[in-house]
């Protein structure tokens, strides 16, 4: 690094302000203004073995609500006072860590903040010329990995089978439906509102869509799936899971990816009342956690990138600008406001 570059790096580190959202208290029900604390701190100088990253995009995911609970799960909860956990894409602006250089674009889990100091754990370089940066938080990131492995490894769809997806206009659901179509399945999406349902059919190529806000899910699903349901990829839980269980076929596979309808409950989580349908139909219900497939991520990324390039898979990102909007942007997930992958752009 030249003297001029070193001087610029030191100036950035000393003068830049890091905008951060921290967990102030654990929410009961929906997160609100009392859940968060907004802080601004001066970006520190980095030490040997560290990199300084300027975050450009932050991933907004339903799983974030679960990370706020002080309960045993697949990952430790965010601690009071900590920067809120989140997937990020950003640019290295200073490096004292082998393998990373100023100018590199990187993907990691650097939290809801405008800058991050990292020692490289979970950080990997990405090609900003290969795909738009938000793609690395969606189709080429955790959403894509979740949909790919959840459907193909756990759902195991076969050509000609009927696949139903709840939360189908969201980041994971929209990818699952398209991958199922690529694999030769008949695909039905469940989403909220006529506009989203039309989007699924007209733009993403789903065979049918069920509007849970303006219709009767059980009745409409029966009409959309006259031969029953072979694979159900569930992102919602609650009543919709119950409705689908009444229509599964023998040896059906139910993939439990999430239960966004239950995350903000102040009462106990509603379990499936129709679970005996699993017994009657010799069906299987299995949960998935994307981190179980880390070693196979390169395979999934190669497949997904190929499908995007060929036009077989369409990606829709819903980008909101301004890190200051984080609390409101997070709630868009639970209000069903997002179309596709919800991403927060740090700066205007």
Image (cartoon, grey):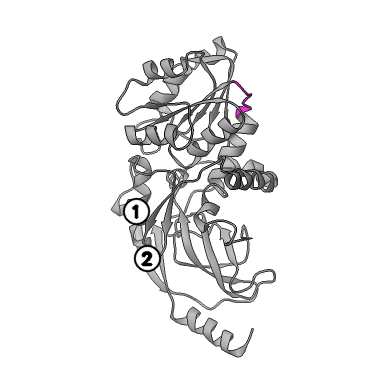
- Which element is circle 1 on? helix
Numbered mark located on residue 348 in the image: 2
Q: Would residue 168 be found to the left or right of residue 91 on screen?
A: left
Question: Neighbour class for label 1 at 10 Å: few (<14), some, many (≥20)?
Answer: some
Q: Which residue is at a point 50% across and 40% down the rendered structure image?
A: 172
Does residue 261 appear anywhere in the picture? no
Q: Which residues are magenta?
A: 155-160
Q: Which residue is at a point 55% across and 29% down the rendered structure image?
A: 255
Q: How many marks?
A: 2
Q: Looking at the figure, which quarter contains the N terminus? A: bottom right
Q: Position of residue 184 (x, y in %)?
A: 60, 27
Residue under numbered circle 1: 327
Looking at the image, residue 287 lies above or below residue 65: above
Residue nearer the viewer, 221 or 142: 221
Numbered mark located on residue 93 in the image: none
Q: Position of residue 85 (x, y in %)?
A: 48, 54
Looking at the image, residue 34 lies above or below residue 119: above
Q: Would residue 28 be found to the left or right of residue 232 on screen?
A: left
């Amino acid at each position: 690094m030249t003297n001029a570059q070193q001087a610029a790096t030191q100036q950035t580190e000393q003068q830049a302000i890091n905008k951060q959202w921290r967990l102030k208290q654990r929410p009961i029900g929906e997160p609100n203004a009392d859940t968060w604390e907004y802080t601004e701190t001066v970006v520190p100088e980095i030490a040997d073995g560290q990199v300084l990253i300027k975050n450009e995009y932050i991933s907004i995911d339903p799983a974030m609500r679960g990370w706020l609970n002080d309960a045993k799960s697949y990952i430790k909860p965010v601690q009071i006072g900590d920067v809120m956990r989140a997937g990020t894409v950003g640019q290295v602006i200073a490096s004292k860590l082998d393998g990373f250089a100023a100018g590199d674009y990187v993907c990691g889990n650097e939290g809801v903040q405008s800058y991050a100091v990292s020692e490289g754990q979970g950080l990997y370089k990405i090609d900003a010329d290969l795909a738009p940066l938000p793609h690395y938080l969606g189709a080429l990131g955790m959403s894509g990995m979740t949909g790919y492995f959840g459907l193909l490894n756990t759902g195991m769809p076969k050509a000609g089978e009927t696949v139903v997806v709840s939360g189908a206009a969201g980041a994971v659901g929209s990818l699952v439906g398209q991958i199922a179509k690529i694999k030769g399945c008949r695909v039905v999406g469940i989403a909220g509102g006529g506009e989203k349902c039309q989007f699924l059919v007209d733009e993403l190529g789903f065979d049918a869509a069920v509007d849970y806000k303006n219709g009767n899910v059980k009745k409409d699903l029966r009409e959309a799936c006259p031969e029953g349901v072979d694979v159900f990829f569930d992102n919602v839980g609650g009543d919709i899971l119950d409705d689908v269980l009444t229509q599964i076929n023998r040896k059906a596979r139910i993939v439990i990816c999430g239960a966004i309808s239950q995350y903000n409950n102040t009462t106990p989580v509603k379990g499936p009342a129709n679970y005996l349908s699993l017994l009657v139909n010799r069906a299987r219900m299995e949960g998935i956690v994307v981190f179980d497939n880390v070693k196979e991520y390169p395979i999934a990324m190669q497949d997904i990138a190929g499908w995007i390039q060929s036009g077989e898979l369409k990606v829709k990102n819903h980008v909101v600008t301004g890190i200051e909007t984080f609390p409101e942007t997070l709630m868009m997930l639970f209000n069903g406001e997002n179309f596709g992958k919800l991403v927060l752009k740090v700066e205007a």
